[in-house]
Image (tube, grey):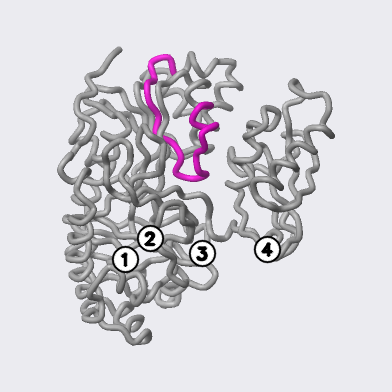
Amino acid sequence: MEFEMGREYWNPKVETMKQAEIKELQLKKAKSIITHAYTNSPFYKELWKKAGVTPEDIKTLDDLAKRAPIFRKDDIRDRMEKGDPFGGLLSVPMSHLVACFASTGTTGVPTFYAYTRDQAENLTIAETRIAWMVKLRPGMRYVVPGGPWHWHSVALFGAWRRISPRFYVAGMVAPITIGHTFDAIVKFKPHHIFAALDVAFALNEEARKRGIETTELFSDLLYARTGHGEPMTKTLFEFFKDKWGIRDAFDGGGIGEGMMVCCDCYAHAGQHMWEDLWHIDLVDPDTDENISVKTGERGEYVVTNLHATGIPYVRCASEDYCEVYPEPCECGRTHIRMKITSRTGWILDIGGRRITPYDIRLVMEMHPETKEAAFTIDKYAKKMDKLKIRAAYDKKITKDPEELKARVQKSIKEKLGIDSEITWVDYSQLPVMMHKIMRITDLTKA
């Protein structure tokens, strides 16, 4: 079935706005939200006074990136543990909030996200642009594995109301109800699906268990939005297009603290982040020193939500490591693009270089025998002199694992400048959480 794709942009005026206009708008919104947070949030007033900075000191976006203090989750945990669920961030009366969500709490005390009606509307605007960008169109059958527990859901439902696909929310998240999601796909035969990467892999595994080819399962599927976890690579894009028989897959991402969403377009040249709604800058994850935002630069991104008045997020550290691309995309959109490559906690010091699992994956995918990038890094010290990995390879392709090992080691040395030690194992011997290989095995905590 064919659908009318129509225009490329949901809002062409905003999505193709000149960078000078974007920066002017960002500064205006940043000044407003900073004053609001400083005036109404006990957390921000204390944080900024300690840093010796006032809202009047922020006269440019450069001031925002270099003078405004950063905060992290741990900075608000004390207040949360003492009974304030919002950690001192709440900046409006409770009666002004229209929705409140809690995180899973897997990394500590659950974080509460809440927003006002205006913020819900702005999140919906952001998500509608993304949904249209990833080719969701009126009348499409659309399956979404996941329930309404996530703060993102308000934006999703709002976007769907605007675009009008026929959507089905299938169960919760993998692996708990992956069978329900699978059954929904069989029954509803979607044209589009929104499935985080671990859910997508879980669907592949469920199809294998049931003896169904994924091209048969997704016989009507045209597009998929995935990612939202481990970063997508060129090989993964091609894998889904081939394995599912679809036209394209898209890589999404975002952050709870800051309540920001982003996604790539057909160019697959980084995830578009709407700069009229958020501002990001880069810092060194070890020192918090500012890093210039220029093409291909890497750092931890720090987000300022330019529309959140309920719980403001001013220079909230993401704990995500990314590359940025501030120049316009070939699709015509002018907002900054980013490629989230790793959690900051996954950055390894190997031979004096910063190495992430994403870097290793790109090298593994260069070789047909290790194209699936089935590996885990053994972290044996805080600072390592060489990379140690356990990996699986396709035994159908090579009968000489030692020759393959030498080739992969050579590629690692050439691409990353580090020495490596590779131990071949069966896929079943690799550590797995849910349906994803654990990319780092921390032996220092053994």
Is residue 154 at all visible to an observer of this figure?
Answer: yes
Distance, label 3 to label 1, CA atoms, is 20 Å
Numbered disc in front, either 3 or 2 = 2
Considering the image in quadrants, where does the N terminus appear? top left
Q: Earlier along the polypeptide chain: callout 4 or callout 3? A: 3
Task: Look at mark 3 in the image and give the residue it sits on.
Answer: 108
Element type where label 1 sits in the image: loop
Task: Look at mark 2 in the image and give the residue it sits on.
Answer: 257
Numbered disc in front, either 3 or 1 = 1
Give how far across and how far down residue 350 sits, in percent. 69, 59
Element type where label 4 sits in the image: loop
Q: Nearer the viewer, residue 197 or 185?
A: 197
Distance, label 4 to label 2, CA atoms, is 31 Å
Look at the numbered discs 4 and 1 and tell me whether their residues touch, using CB distance below 8 Å.
Answer: no
Q: Amino acid at mark 2?
A: Glu
Mark 4 residue crowding within 10 angstroms, few (<14) / some (14–19) / many (20+): few
Magenta residues span 218-239
Task: Look at mark 4 in the image and give the residue it sits on.
Answer: 352
Considering the image in quadrants, where does the C terminus appear? bottom right
Element type where label 3 sits in the image: loop
Distance, label 4 to label 1, CA atoms, is 34 Å
Give how far across and how far down residue 157 sits, in percent. 26, 40
Asked if residue 10 is positioned above or below residue 298 in the image, the reply reads above
Numbered disc in front, either 4 or 2 = 4
Element type where label 2 sits in the image: loop
Q: Earlier along the polypeptide chain: callout 3 or callout 1? A: 3
Distance, label 3 to label 2, CA atoms, is 14 Å
Asked if residue 46 is positioned above or below residue 418 in the image, the reply reads below
Q: Earlier along the polypeptide chain: callout 4 or callout 1? A: 1
Q: Amino acid at mark 3?
A: Gly
Task: Look at mark 1 in the image and give the residue it sits on.
Answer: 313
